[in-house]
Image (spheres, rainbow, N blue to C red):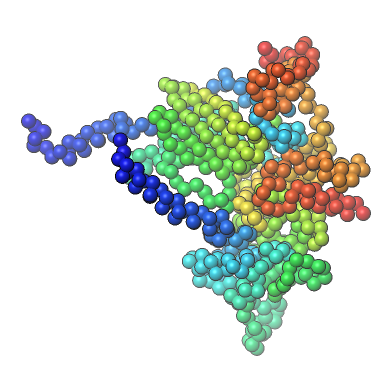
């Protein structure tokens, strides 16, 4: 028999090489490529942008609610430091921009050690480490993308991200603290990539929040270069504020969303008490004029 | 199936691991383990001493911003001596707080200082004393120490400045010390390491804590905001508001421009609320009852030290009343 003349270790080596080269032993999925976002999920929030004071479906606490109520959209024009501010790593996955994923391999072992992502908006970049590096020191600066480590569970990539900068949970003034953590689950179905994100924010939430986003692969997609120049748009707002905000109980727009879509006002205020079926037992009557609901109405 | 002997072995190893590393964790939690964290350029931070000690380390000298409790001095210097044998030349005090200048007298014996003025060379030539480091602070730190009751038992300084700025060149880098009048106190200094692009802010930035506006030492809410606005003028962010100039806080993690912005914004918004309430004729108790820091309490008023929300609101209220007088 031919195998009798071949050292056993060479046989095993050959089999291992075949398996490794075909990826049969390595379960890791390669998410590399250019991806276009699909907006069938949460389109009103993601594309035109959320309404002011729409906190529906958000497990927020009182602190987050008052942050949102105080938010004046003039802030991003007056506070010049916000002009080139990128999204947080969690929110960036919901933006109106393409996603590119590059796989990084160790040149010695040829094993994947990271995925690097780039989002078209602001050219935001993020690294998802697969080689289990140490997390940053407590005193290290936080970043907008945060610090991400990933590991595979079968075909699913699970990602833990910490060390975020303060950012927003929703672009209407709902804040996301620098102490939040996220757990993402990346799954690929053919040409579709689904990312489920669980956000846990002890500062602004009373329980974790789950969101999901989907992309479709586009081999022809190419991202444009990105640069942002800070230019002061307004020195102060009409009230002379260097940080535009509404005083408590003086935001004139709190009812607008509920009235526009004829919703119970309490339901637009968010919080877990409004997120589960039991809320229907205590839900008050809708506010506003039904005739006024002219867009995105059921 | 695993054999019982194997499971017992694992259990024993787990216990040993827990005992061994549990001990380390306890030491760290007690703040007994220092770390030397490289910020940028020639600037480092000694972390773990209860207060952030900013250190510029170069071939020419070592410059400190603030000093820790004496119990940390040996460990701190051991960490620094692992990367530099340069002499200590400057210790800059950011404010008259016990926790920021606790070891000035000890540090005074660790290096040598220069002489000021045009006669400096002559003074050295005729045998002037060059032992000790330059212990620098704004003049108001000294004035407060002698003129008011305070909680600082002793104060060791060799040099004070009364001008808006004090600058010098060390380790091939310009170092600018700016006086921030009437902020945390009336003797606050921030230190800008220009080539390294790092600003040490002392207690004008404390991540995760409300600002300590010490009215008894000349602090004020509006001065605090002006100090942060001035700091923001100095800072240049990196791409997409990430990195660029770094800010070393008195306590807590290092930040960049956007961290200072968020801190300033919080202070401005709470100030505006209380200002409005004062204009409506509300008493301090009424203001406290209205909870004007509700949206910031979970982020800044937790259990990480610093002023409580009540102390913070009270300081702003009193500061604004004083400003109206």
| B130 w.r.t. B276: above or below | below
Q: Where residue B234 sits: x, y (%)? A: 68, 53
Quarter holding the C terminus of chain A is top right
| B87 w.r.t. B251: above or below | below
Extreme front residue here? B4
Quarter holding the N terminus of chain A is top left
Quarter location, residue A74? top right
Name the side, left or right, on which B61 lies relative to B189: left
Extreme bottom residue here? B126
Q: Where residue A232 sits: x, y (%)? A: 72, 41
| B78 w.r.t. A153: above or below | below
Total numbered circles: 0
Name the side, left or right, on which A225 lies relative to B291: left
Work out whether residue A119 can be spotted: yes
Name the side, left or right, on which B226 lies relative to B26: right
Residue at 45% across / 46% down in the picture? A133
Residue at 88% across / 54% down in the picture? B322
- Of B302 and B113, nearer the camera is B302
Quarter location, residue A71? top right
Name the side, left or right, on which B280 lies relative to B94: right
Residue at 42% across / 21% down in the picture? A190
- Of B14 and B231, nearer the camera is B14
Work out whether residue A220 can be spotted: no
Q: Where residue B297 sits: x, y (%)? A: 72, 43
Q: Where residue A160 sits: x, y (%)? A: 50, 38
Residue at 63% across / 39% down in the picture? A202
């Amino acid at each position: 028999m031919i195998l009798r003349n071949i050292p056993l270790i060479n046989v095993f080596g050959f089999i291992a090489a075949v398996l490794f080269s075909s990826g049969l032993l390595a379960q890791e999925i390669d998410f590399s490529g250019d991806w276009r976002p699909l907006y069938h999920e949460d389109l009103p929030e993601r594309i035109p942008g959320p309404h002011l004071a729409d906190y529906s479906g958000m497990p927020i606490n009182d602190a987050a609610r008052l942050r949102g109520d105080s938010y004046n959209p003039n802030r991003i024009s007056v506070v010049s430091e916000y002009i080139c501010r990128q999204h947080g790593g969690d929110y960036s996955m919901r933006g109106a921009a393409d996603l590119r994923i590059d796989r990084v391999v160790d040149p010695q072992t040829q094993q994947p050690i990271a995925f690097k992502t780039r989002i078209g908006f602001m050219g935001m970049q993020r690294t998802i480490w697969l080689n289990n590096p140490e997390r940053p020191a407590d005193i290290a600066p936080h970043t907008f993308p945060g610090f991400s480590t990933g590991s595979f569970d079968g075909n699913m990539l699970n990602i833990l991200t910490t060390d975020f900068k303060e950012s927003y949970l929703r672009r209407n003034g709902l804040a996301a603290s620098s102490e939040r953590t996220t757990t993402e689950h990346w799954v690929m179905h053919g040409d579709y990539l689904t990312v489920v994100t669980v956000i846990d924010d002890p500062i602004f939430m009373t329980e974790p929040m789950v969101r999901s986003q989907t992309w479709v692969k586009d081999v022809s997609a190419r991202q444009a270069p990105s640069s942002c120049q800070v230019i002061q748009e307004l020195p102060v707002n009409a009230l002379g504020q260097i940080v535009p905000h509404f005083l408590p109980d003086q935001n004139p727009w709190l009812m607008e969303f509920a009235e526009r879509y004829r919703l119970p006002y309490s339901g637009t205020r968010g919080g877990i008490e409004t997120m589960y079926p039991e809320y229907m037992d205590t839900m008050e009557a809708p506010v506003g004029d039904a005739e006024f609901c002219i867009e995105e109405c059921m | 199936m695993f054999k019982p002997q194997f499971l017992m072995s694992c259990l024993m190893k787990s216990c040993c691991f827990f005992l061994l590393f549990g001990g380390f964790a306890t030491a760290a939690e007690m703040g007994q383990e220092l770390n030397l964290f490289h910020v940028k350029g020639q600037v480092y931070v000694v972390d773990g001493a209860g207060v952030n000690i900013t250190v510029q380390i170069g071939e020419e000298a070592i410059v400190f911003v603030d000093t820790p409790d004496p119990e940390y001095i040996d460990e701190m210097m051991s960490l620094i001596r692992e990367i530099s044998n340069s002499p200590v030349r400057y210790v800059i005090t950011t404010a008259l707080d016990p926790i920021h200048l606790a070891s000035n007298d000890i540090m005074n014996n660790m290096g040598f200082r220069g002489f000021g003025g045009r006669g400096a060379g002559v003074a050295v030539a005729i045998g002037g004393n060059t032992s000790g480091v330059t212990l620098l602070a704004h003049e108001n730190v000294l004035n407060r120490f002698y003129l008011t009751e305070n909680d600082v038992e002793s104060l060791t300084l060799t040099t004070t400045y009364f001008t808006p700025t004090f600058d010098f060149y060390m380790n091939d880098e310009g170092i600018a010390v700016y006086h921030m009048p009437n902020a945390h106190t009336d003797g606050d200094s921030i230190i800008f390491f220009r080539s390294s692009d790092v600003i040490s802010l002392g207690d004008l930035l404390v991540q995760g804590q409300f600002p300590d506006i010490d009215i008894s030492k000349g602090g004020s809410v509006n001065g605090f905001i002006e100090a942060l606005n001035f700091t923001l003028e100095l800072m240049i962010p990196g791409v997409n508001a990430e990195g660029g100039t770094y800010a070393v806080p008195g306590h807590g993690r290092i930040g960049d421009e956007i961290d200072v912005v968020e801190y300033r914004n919080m202070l401005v918004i709470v100030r505006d609320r209380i200002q409005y309430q004062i204009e409506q004729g509300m008493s301090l108790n009424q203001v406290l009852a209205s909870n004007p820091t509700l949206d910031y309490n979970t982020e800044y008023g937790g259990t990480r030290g610093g002023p409580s929300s009540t102390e913070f609101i009270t300081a702003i209220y009193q500061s604004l009343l004083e400003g109206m007088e």
